[in-house]
Amino acid sequence: MAKGKRTESPLDAQRRATEEQRTAMNLTVLQRMDPEVMEVLEMSRHVVLYAFDCAGQSWSKLDVEGSMFVVRKRRAFSCIILNRSGLENFVQDIGTYTMVQIEGPYLMCTNSTNNQVV
């Protein structure tokens, strides 16, 4: 074995294969929902969606929670939450009109076209 080169343990190889299978399976599900989806860039296994009420200066929980994916589509990027709490999935296109900010464990997204903060 070359000096400084580590070999992958069988357990690490299995974890990597399982993660690759999970990503491929998720991509298939997302493509059934939207054939424009080309690639899963990032994912979180569980998120809860809140909306900010500018007038009341407060957050309210929406009926959306589940796995979140940042995906590359043919002509755009999107954030998709596969909703386990309701019938409607959440889809937010990410473009020049979208501002994303990370605050600790929170991801805040502002859409300037409809002034929605989630």
Image: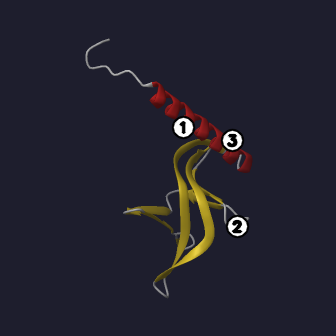
Mark linked to residue 2: none
Could you tell me which secondary element the residue under label 2 belongs to?
A: loop
User: Left or right: 10 with respect to 66?
Assistant: left
Contact (Cβ within 8 Å) of mark 3 with mark 2:
no
Q: Quadrant of the N terminus?
A: top left
Could you tell me how far apart the alpha carbons at marks 3 and 2 are, in whole angstroms? 21 Å
Q: Position of residue 29 (x, y in %)?
A: 69, 46
| Residue assigned mark 2 | 86
Q: Crowding near pointer 3: few (<14 within 10 Å), some, many (20+)? A: some
Do the residues under discs 2 and 1 have CB atoms within 8 angstroms? no
State the residue at coordinates (65%, 40%): 25
| Residue 19 tag number | 1
Q: How is the image coloured?
A: secondary structure
Disc 3: which residue: 28
In the rendered structure, which amino acid carries the disc numbered 2? Gly
Q: Amino acid at mark 1?
A: Glu
Who is closer to the viewer here, 112 or 8?
8
Q: Nearer the viewer, residue 29 or 10?
A: 10
Residue drawn at (45%, 30%), measured in percent from left and top? 12
Left/right placement of residue 31 relative to residue 103 reads: right
- First-in-chain label (1 vs 3): 1
| Element assignment for label 1 | helix
Position of residue 116 relative to residue 3, above or below, is: below
Residue at the extreme top: 1
The three-letter code of the residue at mark 3 reads Thr
| Mark 2 crowd level (few <14, some 14–19, many ≥20, 10 Å Cα) | few
Between circles 3 and 2, the one closer to the viewer is: 2
Q: Residue 46: name its quadrant.
A: bottom right
Say which label, 2 or 1, has the lower sequence index.
1
Q: Is residue 26 above or below residue 103?
A: above
Q: Residues within 10 Å of mark 1 (few under 14, many from 20)?
A: few
